[in-house]
Each structure stands twice: as structure tokens, then as C-alpha cells.
Image (tube, coloured by chain):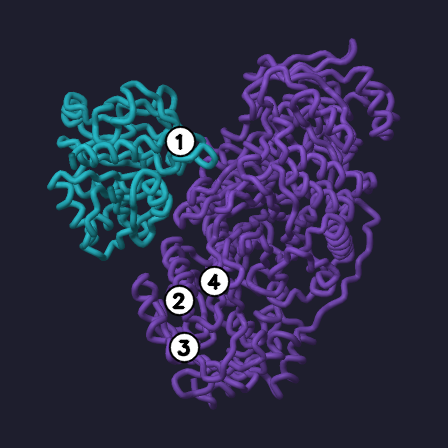
Chain colours: A cyan, B purple
Amino acid sequence: MRFGVLQFPGSCDEVDALRAAERVGEAELIWHGDRDLRGADAIVVPGGFSYGDYLRAGAIARFAPAMESVIEFAREGGPVLGICNGFQVLCEARLLPGALLVNANRRFTFRQLELEVVNASTSFTRACVEGERLSIPAKHAWGRYYADEQSLQMMHERGQVVLRYAAGQNFNGSLADIAGVCNEAGNVFGLMPHPEHAVDQLTGGSADGLKIFQSMRLAVDGAAV
Amino acid sequence: MSAAAAASTLPTLQDALALGLTADEYELVCEKQDGPPNVLELAMYSLLWSEHCAYKHSKKLLRTLPTEGRYVVLGPGENAGAVDVGGGLACAFKVESHNHPSAVEPFQGAATGVGGILRDIFAIGARPIAVLDSLRFGEPAGESGTRTRYLLDGAVSGIGHYGNSIGVPTVGGEVYFEGPYEHNCLVNAMALGLAERARLVRSAAAGEGNVLVLFGASTGRDGIGGASVLASAELAVGDTSAGSDSDKRPTVQVGDPFEEKKLLECSLELLQRDLLVSLQDLGAAGLTSSAAEMASKGEVGIEIDVERVPLREADMEPFEVMVSESQERMLCVVEPGNVDAVLALCEKWEVGGAAIGSVTDSGRVRVVAGGVQVGDMPVRALVDDCPLYDLSPQKPAQPVYPAPAATLAAQATIEQTLLALLGCPNIASRRPLFEQYDAIVQSRTVRRPEQADAAVLALADGSALAVSIDCNGRRVAADPYRGTVETVLECAANLACVGAEPLGTTNNLNFGNPEKPHIAWQLAEAVRGLGDACRALAAPIVGGNVSLYNEGATGPIYPTPVIGMVGRLPDAHAAGNLGFAREGEEIALVGPFDPSADASELAKLRGEQLPDGLAEVDVAAVRGAHVAILEAVRAGAISSAHDIAEGGLAIALAECCLAGGIGARVALGEEFWQATARAAPRLRALSPAGERVTAALFGEGPGGFVVSGPSAALGELGERATVRRLGRVGGDALTIGGDDQLSLAISLQELALAHASLEELFS
């Protein structure tokens, strides 16, 4: 199992994501200018401030040559995980529904958060159980999830709401406490909190985030059988 | 500009004075130049001979500081100092100020302060791994409140904006609110980096014929005169007329963290590929300072063609190109055969790069525009020949600072006092600030803010670095020598609480106008204290910065020698915590803590004048307590350790309860006072009894720790240091008893509410 982790100018958490992925499989960085995903079985679009996020978070990164290949990879059913800025990029690329707006408190906020697993049957949460709580840190200024009412209802019906903030944890003001969503096909997943920063009790405050990467491994291994 | 035109418009003495030089200095410049300097030359001299660049009022004092030790890899003089941290690695670190820019424009001032200190770290080839900050503002309530909130909000947002965007965690810091900082806030930023020891790079230019490559952002008109006009003069407080501080806003630089992120990655890759001879960042005084310093260190000459510098604005004058403080730029020396490879790598990282000159053997900085010479100066004159001044220190006969306004009634109960202290701006939780910073990127952060007294950063070999930054300016104002000694001890105490011993120290000396005898006295005494304390702790100074002229019409700031200290602990997993951990464990006061209410936070709330002097410190005894604590932490013998600082013992106990989410039942009973008679004779001798109890609970002084753990472990600790048993961990309140006079219980909820008082500053 091989993860490819994208690297844009302005990525900040790509090495953290690389190290987290290496705990469950092989992993390598993919430069934003490369179209070749080098046979990766799964893609991680990491956190940071791609291209400085100067136009709108994720708005420029989605046009990177590597992203064009990722969009194709996703359309063919390949698993794609977007974390924080990566989530924003996947929304900008229309691989995920909705958008991320400025936090309700209008400030960059860093906090260790409690999340609830709403759908434990996805390729990104199958190592979890429904209703399980995960302790994972979040750190962002633009993390308020928004989708129109009709989309939101369809997402709920189709199980696309994968993670939500536990009661009292939704500091960014996301609609319906949504912390992470997947696409209709279930192979693209984005979340604002950082599972790659919760893979080791020593530095992560918990190792719960590892379950996201383990789930991807299970999904890829299962598909290969 | 032709030579003839230049000659006809030679600047005068008046121009030199306007640029901050004295008449005598101007005369000396003329002598060094064999005649009056032209516009460009005068601009360069005025910057390099400014206080900010030449340290002309502090250099003689700084030479007395200890700079050598077993762990020192790079001492003062390079872009940053560095210490050996084992495994072939070195930790580079340094603190720098950006005070006056932040007073004029807090967001950009603070942001570019972070950008500048990060460049110092990667300029020596180290990858930045952490940022800390040290901030000072006026009181957040009352008349100054509106401005304080504006400055605080701007500075915190600016630090976050830069650090968060560049992927370097902000892992700690400190902030104080005091009247003397109202018109002159302080923004100091410290950064740490890691490098392979063998690959640290120096800034000395070398090799005649080698090429100077400028890379990073293009050069604009921003920050012109920042080092001289802004950083080396007093601010014009409250003046809104022409020539006021708001008019100086264009001298503040504008930061772009995305540009710096690319510059950082590009610089490190250039070094990794061995493409550079030397590297230097562009900070204060821009190209002028970088080129002159590189030439001076390498004892060579440098020639720069300003027409080859990529510009942001057309038609910039040669002198503007040479003094611009545009951010996110680096200057490197490259062998001619490597220039193409260097420029190709710049292209990969989407960073501008241009060959702008060469290394010569002339010993001169020569500036040309196209083929025409526009400036020619001896390197030695620019860098080494600025006159150094002796200070005329004199202890002031009268108090320098007015007494603060009283905010706590004289008849307040112990309970009211405890809650008032816990909620006062200097003690309340810093959560509303540090939550705006990414503290965890790079996956090294073992202890986040408010989890322990020092930040802890894991290294690949299983060990960890610990880092602390501190300074209680009020106590330094009361006694510059002992207050500075206490500040250094405080940093070491913070390290001890996580199990780390000091490796090295950096400092930022923030003071008023050194030409005034009472400020000179503060500065001289503080440097004497800094040297003595660092020698006693074997924690040498590896680098630092001086920020003078921090005063305006309302007087000087408190003398604020900000100390940053880096230490190491062998096992990251054994790093200490500050919060009480387990119900039933015993709590003790450890160390030769002999507190007094003098110059304490309580004295401030009571509106008391600063005392003339602090009690003498037994540095060896305090050091002994540090060692006992750090060894107990490393051995895993104790569950928590917290250094007693502002607000004294009672506040330390409350902080341990809040951090652990569990209460404590303690008593200052007969046993405590008997032990105190031996360990703290000054405190025991206080009378009446009410004052004695108040001083025991809220008094301040060095050498005290609140520790919790199994009873047997505290017994063992007692063989190494003074241990006064206080009570046990448990319940959901802080209960303090003793006798009929002393009996209180405050719930965790009430404590937390008081502690959260800074939230409203950001609402």
C-alpha cells in the first residue's frame, strides 16, 4: 500500500501527513508540478496554506498539474483524503460538496477537539465504530462548513456526513456540526481537524487519528483482494 | 546619477543629523571617506552606525557576558547562536525585538518580527522548529485599554499570521501588562532551529571572484530608514502632528509568510546541495548591512551593481536599493560555476534570484549603477569604526516609575485576594492568545502551552529540547541586578519542571534611553546580573539583541531583559507536567523559597510603589533545588512540578489544580511554619501574623516549586532540597486551611472563571 502526499508551495503539514501514512504503509511526497502520481494507491492532500491561500483557501491549488491527476484518480474511484487546506482544495475542485467559510469567531483557532464518528462504513472510518469519539486537534481560520439545505439533506441521507464535532466542540460554527464529509461515491473524504497530528500519544494528545489512515489501508487492501 | 551630479548635491551636516548621526560621528565619517560622503554613502553609514546595528551604547557591556561552555557550537556574532544537542545535531536559537515597528503598526510589526527571527535561524542552515514570543503592553483596563487591546490584538494576529502560515509551531511565550509599556509596547520573538552540526553555515564572504546572489522577494521602498529613524530613537508619544509616529508607518516593513516559506525551503535545499559558500539574511538596513557584514567577517571586499537588483518599483535611487528593508530576501556567495544551479533552484521554488555583484580583495564596499560608481567605502570603517560610547550609570535618587493605581481593596479577604490575582491580566490564562497559534505542526510538540512550565520538543533520538522565555520587568525595575538574576533563575526553573538542564541562553535587552544616567544604571546592573546568573548556571549566552530608546514623553519602559533558555532532557516520555495528576498524592513546597510581598503582583494590585531593591538571592541554593527537581522529574518519581512565580504559592497551587482538573486540600499548619523557620527566616519573622500568612500565600521570590507525588518520593526529594509538606491532591476545590484565621475553599469552577478573564479582550 503506497500513499502519495501532495506538496504545494505553502504546504505546512505535508511531512506530518507523510510520517503518519508511513505508520500504516509506504508513503512519498508528490510535487505540485508533477502530473505523475507514481502508482500511489491513495492520495493525501495535506494542510497548510497552498500558494499562500491568497485568492481564497485552496482556490489556486486546485489548478496544479498534480491536482489535475488527482481529480482523474478520484473519478476512477481512487481514495483521496483532504486535511484542512486539503479539504478546502477538494471542495474548490468540486470533488466534495459544500464550502469552508471563515470561522464564526473570525480567528485562527487551535484546539484539541472531540469528534464523533457518524458513518463508520466509509473507506476512511472503517477502523472506527459508529458513535465512537476521536480526540483530534484542529487548527484553522477558514473551517466553517457550509452547504445549501438541499445538499445537506441529501448528504445526511446518503451517509456523506462522516464526522461531526461533539457537543460544545464546534468552535468554527460549521452547519450541523459537520467536521468531515465524503463524496457520494465514498472515495473522497475531507475534514478540517488534523488526524495526522494525532498518531502518537507523545505529540498528538491521542493516537485516534491513526484510525483514519488504518481505515484507508484496510480499504485499499480489501479492494486488492 | 553621474559623479558630477553627485558632487554638486553632497549632503550636509544637517542631513547627517536628520539621519540620526551626531556631529562628531559625521566628522569621523568624513575623515574615513577622505571628504564628505555622498547621499548613498551617508545613508549607509547612518544605518550601520545606528544603535540598532552598531550596539554603540551596549557593546562594551555585552563583552562581559559569558559566551563559552561545553555545549556551545556557535556563539554571538553569527546570525544565531547554537548549542550541541547530541546525535550530531545542533540547536540554533535567538531572540529579537520588533518593538517600535509594532508600536506603529502592530500586525505587520509583529509579523515581520517573526519573519526576521526565522530568517536568522535558516541563514545558518537550521530548519526552524519553534517560535516563542514575549510581549508587553499597557494596562488593558482604564484609559489605556482601547489602545492596549488594539496593539495586543494586532500583535497576536500578526505573530499567528506569520508563524501559522509558514509551518513553524508557536510553542510558548509570555505577556505582561504594565503602565510603563503603554506608549512603548514590546514585541520580542524567539526562534529555534535544528541542523546537523557539521553543516552549519557561516555568513563570512570568501573567495575573490565569487558571485553575490540576492534571492527571495524583489526590493521596494518599504522599511527605508527602519533601523535608524524608527529603531534607534524614542517614540513621539501621543503626538498626532506631522512628524509623529503614525507618519513613520511607511518605515515599517510588510511581511509575506508565503514568500518566506518558499525562501526557507529554497535556502535549505541550496545548502543541502552544497551550492553556497556563505549565506546571510537581509534584515535591518537591508543590503547595506548584509553586504558589509559578510565582507567584514570574511575580511574581503564586495562590489554590488544596484541596477541588477530586481525591483518592485521602477526608478528607485541607488541609495534606496541599498537601504530598503523589503522582507523575505537572502544574500549568498556562490562559486561562479554554481550560479546557474542556484538560479535554477530558485526557479523551482518560485523565488526570484539574481547575481548582483561579486567578492573582491579590495576591503571596500563598492556600489555601482550600471558602469558608474555611486559609492565606495572601506568595510572596516562601515562595520568596525563606529565609535563605542561609555555609559554614565547613576542610580536614580528618586523613583523612576509612579505607583500603579490600586485595584484591590486594602481590607480584601484572602479568598478575594486569591481570585483577584488569578484573574489579573499578568496571571490570567493565556489561552485566548495561544489558541491563535498553531503549536503542533512538525509533530514535535510534547508539551503545549499550559501543560508544563516549559515547551518540550521531541528529537528523533528519543530525547527532547525544552525552551522557556521570561522576564518580570517590575522586579527588574525594583532591582536591576537581582531582578535579572531572578529572571535567569526563573527560566532555568521552568526547564527543571520538565526535567531539562540548561544548554545555553539568549537575551533581548529592552531598555530606555541609555544616554540617561538612570537608564544606563539599569542596563549596566542588568547585564551584570545576567552574566553572574548565566555563569552560575553554566548556561552561556550564545546570542541576543539589544533594543534601546524604549521610552517617550511619559518615561521609560520597565527595564526588560527578556531571557530565552534552551535545555535538554534525555527522555521525551519523561517530560514533566504542571497539573496535579492523582487523587490522594501528596503536595509539597520544594526549595529555599523565602517570599515577600515586595514588588509582587499583590503589591501592584494594592497600588504600592516599587521597593528600592529586592532581597538577596542564594543562587547556589536555588540551583540545588533546580537539580533536585529535574532529577526527580527525569526519574518519573513525581507527578507534577510547577515553579512559583507571579502571585506566589496560592496562585501556583490554583494553576496546578486548573491544569490537572482536580482540587487540592492544603494547610499552612504548625509543621509548615516550623519548616519555614529554617528554610525561610525572613518570612517567619514577618509580623503581624496576618501579614505573614499573606506573604506566605501571595509573596514572591525565587527558588520555590509546587510538587505532587507519592509520599515516599517527596521524602526522597527532601534529602536533596528543602521540602515543606502542604497537603494532598483531591476533590473539586482548592481548600487552604491553617488556623482560625485561614480557612477557605474555592471550587475549580470559580477558579476557572477568574482565570479566564483575558477572553473578553478578544471578544
Judge left or right: residue B136 versus residue B432. Answer: right
As shown in the figure, which amino acid type bears the numbered disc 2? Arg
Circle 4 residue: B223
As shown in the figure, which amino acid type bears the numbered disc 3? Ile
Query: Do callouts 1 and 2 mark residues in contact (Cβ within 8 Å)?
Result: no
Q: State the SS at label 4.
A: loop
Mark 4 closeness class: few <14, some 14–19, many ≥20 residues within 10 Å:
many
**A220 or B119: nearer the viewer:** A220
Circle 1 residue: A207
Judge left or right: residue B219 versus residue A90. Answer: right
Query: Do callouts 1 and 4 mark residues in contact (Cβ within 8 Å)?
Result: no
Looking at the picture, do discs 4 and 3 lie on one chain? Answer: yes
- How far apart, in angstroms, are the residues tagged by discs 1 and 2? 36 Å
* Image quadrant containing the N terminus of chain A: top left
Q: Nearer the viewer, mark 3 or mark 2?
A: 2
Q: Chain of mark 4?
A: B
Q: Nearer the viewer, mark 4 or mark 3?
A: 3
Q: State the SS at label 2.
A: loop
Q: State the SS at label 3.
A: strand
- How far apart, in angstroms, are the residues tagged by discs 4 and 2? 33 Å
Q: Chain of mark 2?
A: B
- How far apart, in angstroms, are the residues tagged by discs 3 and 2? 22 Å
Q: Nearer the viewer, mark 1 or mark 4?
A: 1
Mark 1 closeness class: few <14, some 14–19, many ≥20 residues within 10 Å:
some
Q: State the SS at label 1.
A: loop
Q: Is residue B470 above or below residue B530?
A: above
As shown in the figure, which amino acid type bears the numbered disc 4? Gly
Query: Which one is earlier in the sequence, the residue at label 4 or at label 3?
Result: 4
Looking at the picture, do discs 1 and 4 lie on one chain? Answer: no
